[in-house]
Image (spheres, helix red, strand yellow):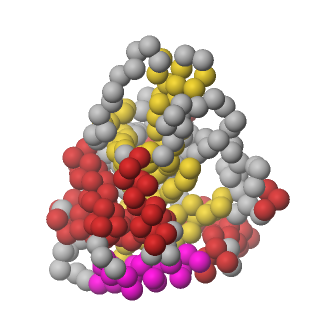
Amino acid sequence: MIHLLFRPIQTLVQKKASLHETPLSIPQEKAYPFQPSRESQTLSHSQSRSASVSSAESPNPNSLTPKIPFFGKKIVPDEDRSRRPTDFPSILFQKLSREEVRSFLAICRSRRSTFNDVLLQAVWTGTLNWQRSHPEQSGICPQNPNHWIRISVPFDLRYPKLNSMPAMNIVSMFFLDRQANQINSSEQFLSGIRREMRHAKRFRLGAWLLVCLKDAHAIWGNLYHAIKMCDCWATLVMTNLGRIFTPEDLSLPRTKEGKIQIKDLILDEIDITSPIRSQTNISIGCCTYAGEMKFSIIYDTSLLRREDARGCLEEILASLRRLLSQKE
């Protein structure tokens, strides 16, 4: 999802680069096609079972929403899937300045690493730090060194001949797993990430998800269990769109800062959000426009509060700054 922010030249307003929140207003029937309402849809399988229970034996409604572990397998009762959580989805944004981005990229080049490699390391370390400081919300034991953190990364499957096409329907997901005792800020950990990502790109490992879904589809009824919406095994989703609306892609008039200008309007900012499916904890997106980098986080409001999501994003960005400021 991309949100374009235009401003007229005559009413130029200096915006603060602080964290801000933008509510997302989506019609009910379009936002959640996979979440049927009770009034318009038939009973689900679990609801059919509960319908045979007498009213005297009906369970307490509060017992239908047990404590959900964060950053692990999360199972939500079918009854909760019939309605969307309050304020869902909710998005937070954080923008990095042009000077900071330029410095980050220069440091990555000097270390012979891509920005995505360092970003993945920052996501792992920042998420782990947030988990340990918020054990109640994360549902993990801070002293447990063996719990897993899985990052789901979109994987572009386009061949060179298809580069001119949008990646909308030619994309898969690649999963990166690390245990807590493996996550740190060392160069050795970064080297492991670098090798794994190069190996995945070379052998197109992102296609394995599609292969697994094809095999699951070959067995009658197995595809439903493979993609069922009531659980999620990934800790979070992380995607970086890179540079968007570049002069090479769009030959339009621009300002000195590189922002698109159409008559008296300037495309000032671009807000992007990565997709989030049912029961996903958080999804982090990133893009660069006119030298400025913008991060977004969209989160499950049935599990996290605004301050929790804000703290998680800030911890990840703080880890990114620490990684790029430390000496080799």
Q: Give the range drawn in magenta.
A: 177-198
Answer yes or no: is residue 308 visible: yes
As rendered, which of 40 and 286 lies closer to the eye?
A: 286
**Residue 315's x, y, as percent?**
26, 59
| Residue that sits furthest to the right in the current view | 161
Residue name at image x 61 percent, y 63 percent: 155
From the viewer's perspective, is residue 260 above or below residue 53?
Answer: above
Instruction: From the viewer's perspective, tell me whether residue 218 is left or right of residue 278.
Output: right
From the viewer's perspective, is residue 203 above or below residue 106?
Answer: below
Residue name at image x 79 percent, y 56 percent: 162
**Residue 226's x, y, as percent?**
58, 66
Magenta part mainly helix, strand or loop? helix
**Residue 2's x, y, as percent?**
53, 38
Choose top left, top right, bottom left or bottom right for residue 231: bottom left
The number of numbered badges drawn on the structure is 0
Residue name at image x 44 percent, y 13 percent: 10
Residue 227 magenta-highlighted = no
Residue 187 magenta-highlighted = yes
Choose top left, top right, bottom left or bottom right for residue 306: top left
